[in-house]
């Protein structure tokens, strides 16, 4: 875990934070990338927004801890010389 100090600087009517190059490289961040933030009592947490892949979308909400309901799978009958 990296630690350090960041300084708030004026940018027009807003304030900004300059991110050190080492962190940009570590998280593969580029200009115009979007960061998501959360605040929790005395913390500000920044996370890079990653585009969701089709694979991620397909399994969104899938709970791996739950057993797969095999009873709803239609396995079909044997075809040709297959044996079950």
Image (cartoon, rainbow, N blue to C red):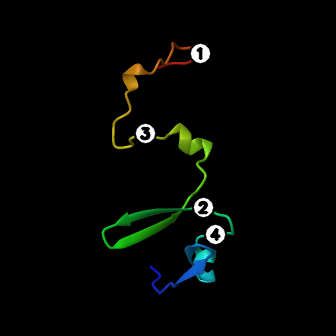
* Residue occupying the point 61% across, 13% down: 80
Q: Earlier in the sequence, mark 1 or mark 3?
A: 3
Q: Secondary structure at mark 1?
A: loop
Q: Quadrant of residue 21?
A: bottom right
Q: Secondary structure at mark 3?
A: loop
How far is the residue under mark 3 from the one under mark 2?
Answer: 26 Å
- The residue tagged 1 is 81
Q: Earlier in the sequence, mark 2 or mark 4?
A: 4
Q: Earlier in the sequence, mark 4 or mark 3?
A: 4
x then y, percent, for residue 66: 33, 38
* Residue occupying the point 48% across, 41% down: 60
Q: Quadrant of residue 55?
A: top right
Q: Residue placed farthest to the front in the image?
A: 13
Q: Earlier in the sequence, mark 2 or mark 1?
A: 2
- The residue tagged 4 is 29
User: Can residue 61 be seen by looking at this rendering?
Assistant: yes
x then y, percent, for residue 6: 50, 84
Q: Earlier in the sequence, mark 3 or mark 2?
A: 2
Q: Which mark is residue 62?
A: 3
How far is the residue under mark 2 from the one under mark 1?
Answer: 56 Å
Q: Secondary structure at mark 4?
A: loop
């Amino acid at each position: 875990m990296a630690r350090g100090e960041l300084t708030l600087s004026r940018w027009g009517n807003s304030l900004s934070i300059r991110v050190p190059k080492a962190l940009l490289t570590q998280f593969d961040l580029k200009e115009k990338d979007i960061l998501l933030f959360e605040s929790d009592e005395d913390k500000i947490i920044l996370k890079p927004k990653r585009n969701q892949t089709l694979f991620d979308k397909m399994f969104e909400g899938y709970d791996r801890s739950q057993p797969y309901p095999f009873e709803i799978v239609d396995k079909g009958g044997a075809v040709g010389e297959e044996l079950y």
